[in-house]
């Protein structure tokens, strides 16, 4: 980040979330190094949502905040593009490309391009455009906010229901924020020249990760997004049971025949199962 060119003065903020290793020692040493200032704060409430909301709280007096995560590296031009989108184009939120980098690991042969989005890859093409719906999402791995959004609306924060702690996976707090911004009609800009590299840990390069990710997403979908239905069977709406069984019936023959797309179909079944479990948990 210190190597970034930026048209306005900026600082780097690192939010430490109860790291148990030598993270703080490394950050303190970096803070003493020359270059753009590094400010370090520790958020003691565990999880990605408290950490993101702490970053917002620490930055409210600034004009804008650019998020990247601890497994990303910014590519040249990131801050220039973010500033241009918000300060010149009038965007209230802007995000761009996230490029998956498997190094030093080897990409598994079964991991097709259609699955890269579930490793946070984002590439909506080479042209800038205004985002009007969820079909072209941008994520907090690479996103910038006009902080007036949060100063003027104290309720607009990352939703703690989608918190992810420790070894948990998924979360969905950034998707929930995107939905909230779309609902309120915020001006959201995609900028392809705003880009980061995302380094994927080895434990994510397993089929089980993709299945668990979708199961956990299904739980949150059933618990927080679905309405309460009047007709249920053992606490579950019959149409959800039908959806789950249909997804299973599609999955089993595809796996037995080793067909392409079997994993993606199994992910659909895992999501349907999670939705059942999540829905029932909010009614019991």
Image: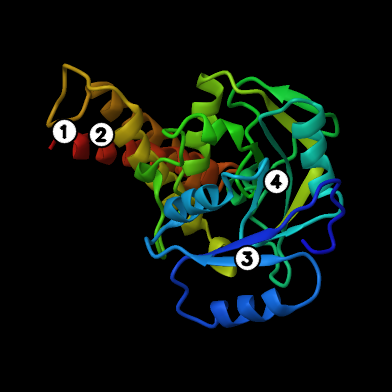
- Marks 1/2 in contact by CB < 8 Å: the verdict is yes
Depth order, front residue of 91/203:
91
Q: Earlier in the sequence, mark 4 or mark 2?
A: 4
Q: Earlier in the sequence, mark 3 or mark 1?
A: 3
Mark 3 or 2: in front is 3
- Marks 4/3 in contact by CB < 8 Å: the verdict is no
* Residue 283 numbered tag: 1
Q: Residues under labels 4 and 3: Cα distance? A: 37 Å
Please give the count of numbered marks on the rendered protein. 4
Question: Is residue 226 left or right of 164 when viewed as pictured?
Answer: left
Q: Residues under labels 3 and 1: Cα distance? A: 44 Å
Mark 4: few, some, or many residues within 10 Å (few <14, many ≥20)? few
Residue 209 image point, x, y percent? 48, 57
Residue at 38 percent across and 47 percent down: it is 216
Residue 127 image point, x, y percent? 85, 29
Residue 143 visible: no
Mark 1: few, some, or many residues within 10 Å (few <14, many ≥20)? few
Question: Is residue 36 left or right of 231 when viewed as pictured?
Answer: right
Judging by the rendered image, the residue that carries numbered circle 4 is 113
Residue 245 visible: yes
Quadrant of the drawing holding the C terminus: top left
Question: Is residue 234 left or right of 40 when viewed as pictured?
Answer: left
Residue at 66 percent across and 29 percent down: it is 92
- Mark 4, secondary structure of its residue: helix
Residue at 73 percent across and 68 percent down: it is 103
Q: Residues under labels 3 and 2: Cα distance? A: 42 Å
Q: Earlier in the sequence, mark 1 or mark 4?
A: 4
């Amino acid at each position: 980040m210190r190597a970034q060119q930026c048209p306005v003065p900026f600082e780097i903020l690192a939010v430490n979330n109860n790291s148990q290793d030598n993270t703080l020692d490394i950050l303190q040493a970096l803070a003493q190094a020359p270059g753009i200032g590094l400010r370090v704060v520790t958020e003691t409430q565990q999880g990605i949502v408290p950490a993101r909301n702490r970053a917002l709280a620490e930055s409210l007096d600034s004009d804008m905040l650019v998020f990247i995560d601890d497994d990303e590296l910014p590519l040249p031009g990131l801050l220039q593009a973010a500033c241009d989108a918000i300060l010149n184009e009038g965007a209230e939120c802007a995000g761009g490309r996230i490029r998956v980098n498997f190094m030093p690991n080897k990409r598994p042969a079964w991991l097709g391009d259609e699955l890269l989005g579930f490793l946070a890859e984002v590439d909506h093409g080479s042209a800038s455009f205004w985002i009007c719906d969820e079909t072209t999402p941008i994520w907090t791995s690479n996103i910038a906010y006009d902080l007036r959004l949060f100063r003027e609306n104290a309720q607009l924060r990352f939703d703690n229901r989608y918190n992810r702690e420790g070894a948990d996976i998924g979360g969905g707090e950034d998707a929930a924020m995107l939905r909230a911004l779309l609902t309120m009609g915020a001006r959201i800009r995609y900028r392809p020249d705003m880009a980061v590299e995302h380094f994927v840990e080895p434990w994510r390069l397993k089929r089980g990760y993709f299945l668990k990710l979708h199961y956990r997403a299904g739980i949150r979908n059933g618990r927080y997004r679905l309405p309460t239905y009047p007709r249920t069977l053992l606490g579950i709406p019959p149409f959800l049971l039908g959806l789950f069984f249909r997804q299973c019936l599609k999955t089993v023959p595809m796996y037995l025949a080793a067909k392409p797309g079997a994993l993606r179909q199994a992910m659909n079944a895992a999501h349907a199962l999670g939705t059942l479990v999540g829905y029932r948990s909010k009614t019991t």
